Amino acid sequence: DQQVKQNSPSLSVQEGRISILNCDYTNSMFDYFLWYKKYPAEGPTFLISISSIKDKNEDGRFTVFLNKSAKHLSLHIVPSQPGDSAVYFCAALNYGGSQGNLIFGKGTKLSVKP
Amino acid sequence: GAGVSQSPSNKVTEKGKDVELRCDPISGHTALYWYRQSLGQGLEFLIYFQGNSAPDKSGLPSDRFSAERTGGSVSTLTIQRTQQEDSAVYLCASRPARSGNTIYFGEGSWLTVV
């Protein structure tokens, strides 16, 4: 049973527009969430994170929103650039519990068209 | 080095042979993780080390997979009697003890079993 779900395997957006990547989770014990970006033939790189005590975190063009009641988070990229084309993974962590590992979604492949 | 280092970067092996994959985490990082990504799949958790002990081995797919960590640093993931379904990118990541929840990935070891 997947605890972290990214239901859209792919997303295509025009350059300059907003990209919205969605992520749902089932485990209410998760208290920290992260987004990673992965280019082909490279390891994932950390992008942005949010603690469960917040509902929004912003870093430049990237903003992550968390809706705890809906167990949903989203990553907004504004404006989208061709260099943002990559696979984006949502991850969740139960930092306060016994689990130390991040649980990842299956990823969403973002294509930003010039 | 400054980042997580993995070797070999690419490995082609014959079915039935054993392989060892090595991970050098970021210096001072106490937590170490192994994930794998098969073609078209997300990041699958394998095992997590805190120091030299592995509190969570739940992701190891079978008893052909094992991992160890020595000196709180280098880790080796061993796959015995490799099968074609073991072909994947094996990603190692590390995390510092106290500062933040972000994990930092290496570039991965690409394993192909023929």
Image: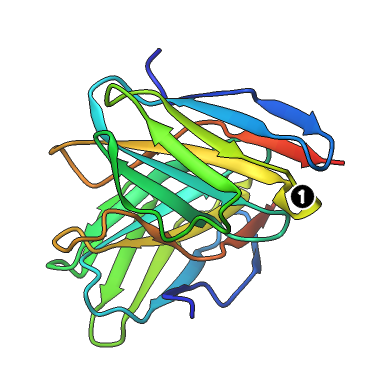
Write the residue at 49% across / 65% down: A105
Percent x, y for residue A58? 27, 54
Q: Residue furthest right?
A: B114
Percent x, y for residue B87? 74, 47
Percent x, y for residue A79? 49, 54
Figure quadrant of residue A91: bottom left
Percent x, y for residue B61? 57, 59
> Which residue occupies the foreground of this view, B98 or B59?
B59
> Which residue occupies the foreground of this view, A18 or A100?
A100
Vertical relation: B55 (above or below) B67 = below
Vertical relation: A98 (above or below) A61 = below
Disc 1 secondary structure class: loop
The residue tagged 1 is B83
Vertical relation: B92 (above or below) A23 = above
Write the residue at 67% across / 41% down: A40
Q: Residue furthest bottom?
A: A70
